[in-house]
Image (cartoon, helix red, strand yellow):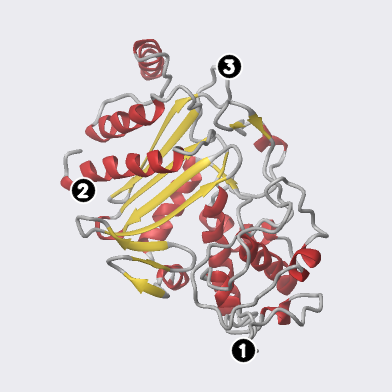
Amino acid sequence: MKYMSFLICVFFTFHGDAQLKTDNQLTTKIDSSVDRAARVYMKDSSRVGLSVGIVYRGHSYAYNYGQIGLATGRLPSSRTIYEIGSITKTFTALLLAHAMEEKRIDWNDDIRKYLKGTYPHLQYASGEPVKVVYLLAHISRFPRSFSGWADNQFKSDSLDQGLKQIKLDSLRPYKYEYSNAGYQVLGRILENIYGKTYDELLSREITGPLHMVSTKVTADRKSQSEMTNGYDARGKLMPPSADSFPGAGAIRSTISDMNIYMQYQLKETDPLVKLTHHPLFGDLENGENALPWAVGRTRDWDYYIREDGGTKGYRCFMVLYPDYQVGIMLMTNQTDDTAGRKLYEMTAAIFKELKTGAVH
C-alpha cells in the first residue's frame, strides 16, 4: 500500500504541473518548502533534472525532479549520479589536510618539491617560490585553467607542458584569483607523494570511512547505469568531463552520498574538516576564503560555508549553515548562464523557511 501511494503521488504530480515529475510526496512542511523552491527553478523549460539534499538538525532528506536525460522519462533517485564540478576541490583540500597530518607534505613547501619535472620559472619576481598553500587558497596567480582542459583535450601527459607555460610576472602572490589549474596540480602532487591514484586516496581517506559508495572519479560498470546525461543551455548532450587531473573537478556523486558528506562537514568532529573551514584572508562580513570554501554571512547575519561546481553539462551548489545545523545540496544535469544564480536563490528560499522554523 505504501508503494502504491508513492506511485500515485508521482503520477498526479507529473500530470498536474506542466509535466514535472517528482518523488516529493508533500507530506511534511519540509517537503512543501523544497517543492515550492524546486518548481521555481524547474519552470525554465530548458531544465532537465534536479536532485535536492537537505540536512536539518541531524536528519537527511532527498528529493528528485525531472529526468535523468531528455526524453527518457526516468526520474532521478537518491542513487542517480551527477558530476559535482568544483565541489571536488573540498575533497582535494581534505586529502591534503590528511597528508599534512601524516607529515607527507608541508603546506608551506615549494610545490616543486613534489613535482617530478624541473620548473625553475615557478617562482615570483621576488624569488619566493609557489607554496602548496597558495594553490589551496587560490592566491598563487596560476591561470584559471590550463589550455585545452575545458575542451577535454588536456591529457595525463600534458601537465608538464602546462606548467612550463605558466608565467608568474607578479612580485608576490596573495591576490585571490580562482584557479582550476592550481587544484589540478594539487591532485597530481597527492598522487606523487602517495604513489596512488586520486580515486584510491579518496576511497581510503574519505568516501570509504564515510560509506559514500557512489562517490568517485572513475565510474564502474554498475555506476554507469545510474549516471545522468548532462546538457548545455540549448539542450545539447555534453561529453563526460575528463578525469586526467581529478583534483579540480572530476568527482561524480549522488544526493544520498552528498547528504552524508554534509553531515560530516557540519559536525566538524574531525579537526581536519575544521581546518579546511578556517578562513585564510578577507573579512567575514564581506566574504572570506578558506580551503577552498567561501565563508561569510548573509544579509541577515547568518554564517555560511559554501562551494558550488559546474562542468559542461552540470551545475551543483552546496551551502552549510553550521549555527543551524542545516545543509543544502542541489545537483542538476543542465547548465546555462542563469543556473548558478537560480540555484543560489533556491537554497536561500529553502533556508529561510528552515531557519524560521516554518517547516515544523
State whether residue 225 appears in this view. yes
Kind of residue sitting beneath label 3? Ala
Q: Residue at x 59, y 37 (%)?
A: 313
- Pinpoint residue 236: horizontal percent, then vertical percent: 63, 27
- Crowding at mark 3 (Cα within 10 Å: few <14, some 14-19, many 20+): few
Q: Which mark is residue 258?
A: none
Q: Which residue is mark 3?
A: 71
Q: CA distance from mark 1 to mark 3?
A: 57 Å
**Residue, disc 1:** 126
Residue 355 circle label = 2
Q: Residues within 10 Å of mark 2 (few under 14, many from 20)?
A: some
Nearer the observer, 346 or 147: 147
Where is 218 relative to 78, above or below? below
Q: How busy is the neighbourhood of tag 1: few (under 14 within 10 Å), some, or many (20 plus)?
A: few
Dot 1 falls on a residue whose secondary structure is loop
* Badge 1 or badge 3: first in the primary sequence: 3
